[in-house]
Every structure is written in C-alpha cells, then in structure tokens.
Image: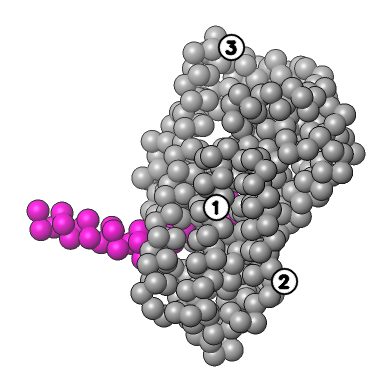
Amino acid sequence: MTRLRAAAGRGLAKVTGQALGPHQSAVVRIGFSATWLFFLLREFPHRRELYGPDGPWSWDLAHRLTDSNEAFSVLMWSDSTLWFELVYAVSVLASVLLMLGWRTRTSAVVFMVGVLSLQNRSVFMGDGGDNVIHLMAIYLVLTRCGRVWSLDARRAARRAGSGAGSGVGVGAGRDVAGPVLWGVLGLVLAYGAVSGRFTAGWLAAFAAVWVVLGLWWTVERHEPEGEGRAVLDVLANLLHNAGMLVTMAEVCLIYATAGWYKIQGSRWQDGTALYYPLRLDYFTPWPALSGVLAGSGVLVMLLSYGTVAVQVAFPFTLFNRRIKNVLLAAMMLEHAGIAVLLGLPFFSMAMIAADAVFLPTGFLVWLGAGASGRVGWGRGLGLGLGRDRGRRGGAGVADAEVAPVAVPVQAGPGGG
C-alpha cells in the first residue's frame, strides 16, 4: 500500500506539475492548422458554393438544422454575403496564427470557431478528414500547444533572456496586443449574448474561456510568483494532459472502429477491397499508377490485409515503443499513399497530424534540432529543444517526462 500511494503521488505530481508531450501537442497544432489553412485556400474560388450563400444547402435549411441539433455556427447569425466573407477571412487568419503559435490559446479558440462555423453551415460537404479536424479543433483549445515551436515560446524566451526570469508579469504592462485582442473578443461575446445568438451551453463555454484568459493576465501582472499563478498552472496542466489523453483515445478509437468494421466486409476478407477504388475515375488522379497497382492481385491483397492488420493492432501496441513506432510509420505511409493514389490529400494530412500525437519525443527533438541548424529557428521557436531528455515510453504523451522550460509562455490574454 505504501508503494501504491507513492506511485499515485508521483503520478499526480507529474500530471499537475507539467504539461506533458509539449512537442507532440505542437506538432498536432501545426498539422491541423496547416491542413485547414491549405483546404480553405484551395477552395477559396468555390467558398460560396461550399459554405456560403450560393451553396445547395441554403441558409434557411442550415438554420433549421442548427436550431434542432444546437450545433454552433456564427454563420447562422446572418445570411449576409459580407458576413460570410468576414468569417471565412477570419478562419484563414486564425489558421495562420495558430500554425505560427501567436497568442496560441486565443488563436485556438478562434480557430475552433472558424472550423465549427463553416462545417456546421454545410454538413454534407465534409468527409472523414473534416470530422477529424472538427474534433481536434475542440481538443486543441484544452491544450497548452504553444509551449515549443511557437511565437509565444519565442516571446517568453526573449523575456527570460532580458532578465524578467519567470515573472512574465514584469513586462505585462507593455503587452498591448493581448488586452486589445481580449477586449475585441469580449465585445463579440457580449453582442452574441445580448442578441441571443448563443445557446446556453456555448455561451457558458466561451464566457468561461474569456474570463479565465483575463484572470490569467491579471495574475501574471500582479502576482507572477504567487499562489494564484501556481494554482492556474496546475489547472492548465491538468486540462492540457486531459486534452492530450482524449486526443490519443480518439485516434485509437478511429483506427479500432475502422479496422474492426473492415474485418466484417467480404471484400476486405477476400483481399480485394483496394482494387475497386483504384478503378474509379473519381479516386484516380494518376490513372496509370493506379492501373499498375490494381493490376497486381498479390499487391492488392497484401495492402488490403496489411491495412486491416495495422489498424486493428495499433491500439494494442501503445505500451511497446518499438512496435508502436513501426506501426505508426506504416500508418503514416499508408495515408501518404492515400493522398497520392486516391487524391485525398486533406484527409491524409488530417490523419497524419492526428497520428503525430504518438511520435516519440526523441524524434521530434531531433527534427527540431535539424530545422534549427538549417534555418536558425530552434533557439526561438523550438524553446528548450536540447533539454527534453525524458524517458520515451510507448504513448506520445508519456514521451515527455521533463517540461522543456520553466518559463511560462503566456504573456497576456491569449497566450499559449
């Protein structure tokens, strides 16, 4: 019992004392924001047909649906074309800012609003990749995904190097962007609340986020080393670790359900399932390449059985680091193949970004150090890259045993 209590105490200290998996959360942040950004840019000429006033799913139909299922979309606030263009532009901007890690916490919230607003406006326009982005946009709000490889981390490093140390609040009075951003979002929240645009649940959620960001800035400004800041850090770490755990569970659930459903299909059982999409014009951006692959019965059978085996086995390999890493590489290669052979690049990007939560910390540190050596961004964006030397277990969150730095990176409302 004594050893059990000691182990429980160590576990509690770990999940409350540090945001685990900082590099994994940063890669997930960059991956999903980049995926959504590239999708919005590619579909920019067709944006009004997909999500706007020229689409087959009219604003009235969308309004009736969101009223019945209480799905959130700011596009339901008005059917104006100008409002739609503004929301689309803000969604693009939020994706850029989240990818760069600028005011990460607030950028993540605005990013989530953009994703939910566009996708819930036209629910029949999405596919599996859009569903993953939909979910991960919500989970990212819970995480401290700007601890490394972000402009927030670079700002914290500069403040620490200038002698402010861990007391970020020393320079908080010079932070103009944070309070202005917080105030603007507060006005939008107030307008939505007064005009009845929010359901009770969404209003409570957004109000809580807005109040917490303001409270964080106030505590950093007036009590950067006090108990209030320590309590906020503990709560933020708990929320972050819970968000990372949910993300991992979601990825495992996706693969487990996909694999077990495939097992029940006769085409997957006889090993011919991949042949059929390779012969459809809609899924053959490279007809010659697809034809060569579909022409080999042995290769089609091996890929069909291999896909099922990897998806079913992956959740059971998380506590064996070597096997997990092999299957993780196989799944990423599989998604890369789907992007090329079936012409589904954004679905593949979304799944690879989700898979990244399980990447080993050592590999990510090496990757960041390599980028640092080539383009000189490691000291700024990759804060503490050379100091993450924790044990590397099977799952991605457990890969980071040591927080990369002791310097808080939230310098004001909206910090990461």
Q: Is mark 1 on a helix, strand or loop?
A: helix
For the point 79% across and 45% down, which residue is it? 88
Q: Which residue lies furthest to the top in this view?
A: 266
Give x and y (percent) for residue 53: 85, 31
Amino acid type, label 2: Val
For the point 42% across and 36% down, which residue is it? 315
Front residue (pair 395, 51): 51
Give x and y (percent) for residue 257: 48, 25
Give x and y (percent) for residue 167: 49, 82
Q: What residue is disc 1 on?
A: 207
For the point 46% across and 29% down, which residue is it? 256
Q: Which residue lies furthest to the left in this view?
A: 1
Q: What residue is disc 3 on?
A: 267
Amino acid type, label 1: Ala
- Please give the label number shown on residue 375: 2
Amino acid type, label 3: Arg
Q: Nearer the viewer, mark 3 or mark 1?
A: 1
Q: Residue furthest front?
A: 194
Q: Nearer the viewer, mark 1 or mark 2?
A: 1
Front residue (pair 128, 292): 128
Label 2 environment density (alpha carbons within 10 Å; few <14, some 14–19, many ≥20): few
Prevailing secondary structure class for the magenta stretch in the rendered image? helix
Relative to 173, is 359 above or below? Answer: above
Relative to 282, is 45 above or below? Answer: below
Quarter of the rendering containing residue 392: bottom left
Mark closer to the chain start, 2 or 3: 3
C-alpha distance separating marks 3 and 1: 50 Å
Image quarter in which the C terminus is found: bottom right
Find the magenta span and give its range: 1-28
